[in-house]
């Protein structure tokens, strides 16, 4: 039997049992209560000097009239109340069955790989909450599926270029167009690019799974920034971009972090700033206190990031310009790795919009407890 009919008949049965109980109880108790009331009225009649025969006749007539009237009223009201109860049971059962059927249909479509279905959320009760949770689950699975498809496509795209180059070099070596030494160097270069891609993918998977290993200790955040500044200063200068380091006048307490992972995050952010800042521009590496955290910011004067893409910059393989190659655009996982590493160390990373244009990435690191 379908769920709707089970719900409908179960609701209707409960109502009918309740009506039968009401009928029996009323027929049992009402005459007793009324007899006590009539006895009081008879006593009042006798006190007024009217004869006992008249009092007894009045009592019998009232009791018979009550019984007949009450029975008639019950027989008339019971079918009407049953009809009203049936309508109510129908409405409630239909809503419950409709939600259950929608959940069943949605789960079947999700099991087949279709995550686009969304249930209507009606009301504010538990059924509406259940439909909302189902929609949240479907949306999450849709994002996961979309991410999986994009990951496969991106990996295939990233591998296509070095594989095509390897094939070209092999054909050139076979035809004698290139000397063996040049072919070997070119092949090593393409293999190194593929190795970097594999290492990036491996690191992303560990970061997203929360399985990255950290060596947390107390470190001077200022010293970490000075090391990153010294590492990138010449690269910025060779491109004609000024790199400035801004540290607070008062020395901040040490932060609890993994120095190697902080260096990796800074390298990703500074490399992005260098890549997108034109010659004659400026980039700033800044350290400042932020409550119980030290906040590190990397700001550039490049073209900035449009509002429509700011929520996606931390997605793996996301690039503003999808046509960029790995040589000029990186692997597209640097910000994803940075976000995972910062959060694993107890901080947060965000993209901010400087008032004078460009882009500014800031992340926090917790101060080490005494």
Image: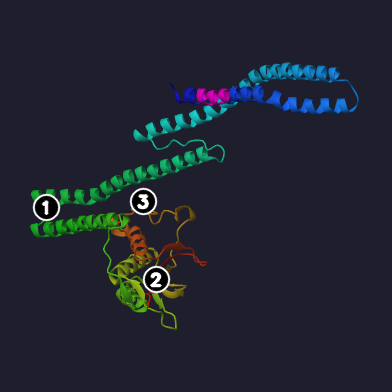
Which label sits on residue 177? Answer: 1
Give the alpha-carbon distance from disc 2 to disc 1, as whole Å: 58 Å
Which quadrant: the N terminus? Answer: top left
Q: Quadrant of residue 250?
A: bottom left
Q: In this view, does 62 lie to the left or right of 230?
A: right
Q: Is residue 133 magenta?
A: no
Q: Does the magenta stretch include residue 14?
A: yes
Residue 90 shows in the view:
no
Nearer-N-terminus badge (2/1): 1
The x, y position of residue 285, in whole percent, is 40, 73
Q: In this view, does 262 lie to the left or right of 167?
A: right
Residue 115 shows in the view:
yes
Q: Residue 79 or 336: which is nearer the viewer?
A: 79
Note whether 107 is above or below 271 in the view shown.
Answer: above
Note whether 2 is above or below 310 in the view shown.
Answer: above
Q: Quadrant of residue 212?
A: bottom left
Q: In this view, does 167 lie to the left or right of 285?
A: left
Note whether 370 is above or below 67 in the view shown.
Answer: below
Give the alpha-carbon distance from disc 3 to disc 1, as whole Å: 33 Å
The x, y position of residue 233, in whole percent, is 33, 75
Note whether 162 is above or below 233 in the view shown.
Answer: above
Which label sits on residue 322? Answer: 3
Q: Is residue 324 left or right of residue 89?
A: left
Please tell me whether mark 3 or mark 2 is closer to you in this view. 2
Which label sits on residue 366? Answer: 2
Which label sits on residue 236? Answer: none
- Find numbered disc 2 in the image and state the secondary structure of the residue it sits on: strand
Q: Please, what is the dominant secondary structure of the magenta stretch?
A: helix
- Specify the segment rendered in magenta: 8-17
The x, y position of residue 132, in whole percent, is 48, 41
């Amino acid at each position: 039997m379908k769920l709707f009919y089970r719900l409908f008949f179960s609701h209707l049965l409960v109502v009918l049992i309740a009506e039968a109980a009401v009928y029996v109880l009323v027929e049992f108790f009402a005459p007793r209560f009324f007899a006590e009331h009539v006895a009081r009225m008879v006593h009042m009649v006798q006190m007024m000097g009217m004869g006992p025969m008249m009092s007894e006749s009045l009592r019998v007539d009232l009791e018979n009239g009550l019984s007949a009237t009450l029975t008639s009223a019950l027989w008339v009201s019971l079918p009407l109340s049953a009809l009203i109860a049936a309508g109510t049971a129908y409405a409630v059962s239909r809503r419950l069955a409709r939600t259950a059927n929608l959940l069943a249909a949605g789960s079947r479509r999700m099991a087949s790989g279709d995550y686009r279905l969304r249930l209507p959320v009606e009301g504010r009760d538990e059924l509406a909450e259940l439909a909302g949770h189902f929609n949240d689950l479907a949306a999450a699975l849709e994002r996961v599926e979309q991410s999986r498809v994009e990951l496969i496509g991106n990996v295939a795209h990233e591998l296509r270029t070095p594989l095509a180059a390897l094939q070209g070099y092999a054909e050139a070596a076979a035809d004698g167009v290139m000397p063996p030494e040049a072919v070997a160097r070119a092949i090593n270069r393409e293999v190194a690019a593929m190795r970097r891609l594999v290492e990036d993918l491996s690191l992303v998977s560990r970061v997203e799974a929360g399985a990255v290993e950290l060596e947390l200790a107390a470190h001077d955040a200022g010293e970490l920034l000075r090391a990153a500044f010294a590492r990138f200063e010449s690269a910025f200068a060779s491109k004609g971009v000024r790199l400035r380091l801004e540290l607070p006048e008062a020395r901040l307490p040490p932060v609890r972090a993994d120095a190697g992972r902080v260096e990796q995050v800074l390298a990703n952010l500074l490399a992005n700033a260098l890549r997108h800042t034109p010659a004659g521009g400026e980039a700033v590496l800044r350290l400042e206190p932020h409550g119980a955290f030290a906040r590190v910011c990397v700001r550039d004067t490049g073209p900035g990031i449009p509002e429509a893409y700011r929520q996606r910059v931390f997605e793996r393989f996301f690039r503003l310009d999808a046509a960029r190659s790995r040589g000029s655009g990186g692997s597209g996982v640097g910000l994803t790795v940075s976000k995972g590493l910062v959060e694993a160390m107890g901080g947060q990373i965000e993209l901010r919009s400087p008032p004078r244009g460009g882009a500014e990435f800031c992340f926090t690191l917790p101060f080490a407890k005494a």
